[in-house]
Image (cartoon, rainbow, N blue to C red):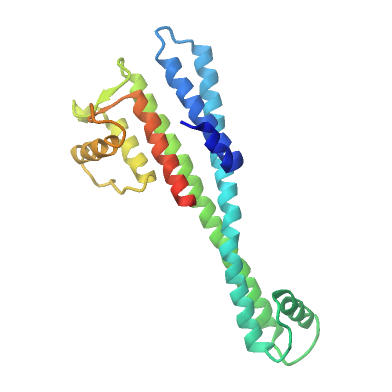
Amino acid sequence: MDYLAFLKYGALGISLALAILSFRLLSKEQDREEVRQPMLNSIKNYLYLAVFLSVFFGLSELANNFFSPQTETSDAGLEHLWNDHFNGFPDSTFQQKLERIGAHIQTDTPKTDTAEICATLLETLENCRAELEKCQSEVADYGTGFYQNVIKLKKALSADPDGWTNLEWAPEKKTAIFEALREIFQRLGYNYADLTDKQLIAKWKLLKSKWTTEDLGYIFQSDISQIVREFLNKYEKNGQ
């Protein structure tokens, strides 16, 4: 993996790269014959911090990008207000029109209902605020939920003495693994919530076939890093 490519995404890219590196380091440490528990705990703490920073910077980036389309909405509202009440003035630029409306609000000119003007501007502001809060909530749940379920899947595999699992063997004993898989698929954009365990195994085989043709019914520690890569690729495609 070319980690230098993450640098073009700024702080978000760096934090994601650190999260992946720490995740791989955690996998290597857990695969040792003699696990060093203090080192393992330190790596886990570092991984949690990197994931938190990734979500934080991701939210910040999306929040900043969110304001651009709302600017178009505000411009449209101003134009509508201008055409209804101020089209007799020669002003042409956005700034000139905004100053004209602002100056009018501070006067007692009876030709225009200033309450209507204020109500229009306040409504636009409230719409922007509501959409931003909705966006932040969805993005926070989207990113955090994915990594939480990746960690849950990782713990479920680590609980097995072999460190891996065969989904087709005794699936009724793997409730935690199937729950984590369903949530991970959801964050990747697939709605598999109503599928049976057998159907979910088929979907897992289809996903895993993107990076290997062997042991499709199994989940190994190495498959988890591939799942994270699928998630990062989805972020990259959405950003284009």
**135 or 78: which is nearer to us?**
78
Q: Residue at x 74, y 88 (%)?
A: 90
The vertical placement of 29 against 165, above or below, is above
**Is 60 on the left-hand or right-hand side of 222?**
right
Please state if 213 lies on the left or on the right of 58 as rendered.
left
Locate residue 29 relative to residue 159 in the image: left or right: right
- Work out which residue is located at the far top of the displayed protein and give it: 34
Along the line of sight, the residue nearer the viewer: 211 or 72: 211
Image coordinates of residue 218 in percent, x first then y, are 25, 27
Q: Residue at x 56, y 62 (%)?
A: 130
Above or below, 113 against 144 in this view is below
Q: How many marks?
A: 0
* Residue 42, position as x, y percentages in the image: 55, 19
- In the depicted view, which residue is nearer to us: 192 or 25? 25
Q: Position of residue 100 (x, y in %)?
A: 76, 81
Q: Is residue 20 in view from this perspective?
A: yes
Q: Residue at x 49, y 12 (%)?
A: 37
155 or 101: nearer the viewer: 101
Q: Can I make out residue 52 in this image?
A: no
Where does the image place residue 154, in percent across and percent down from the top left?
A: 38, 26
**Quadrant position of residue 126:** bottom right
Residue ID at (55%, 45%): 58
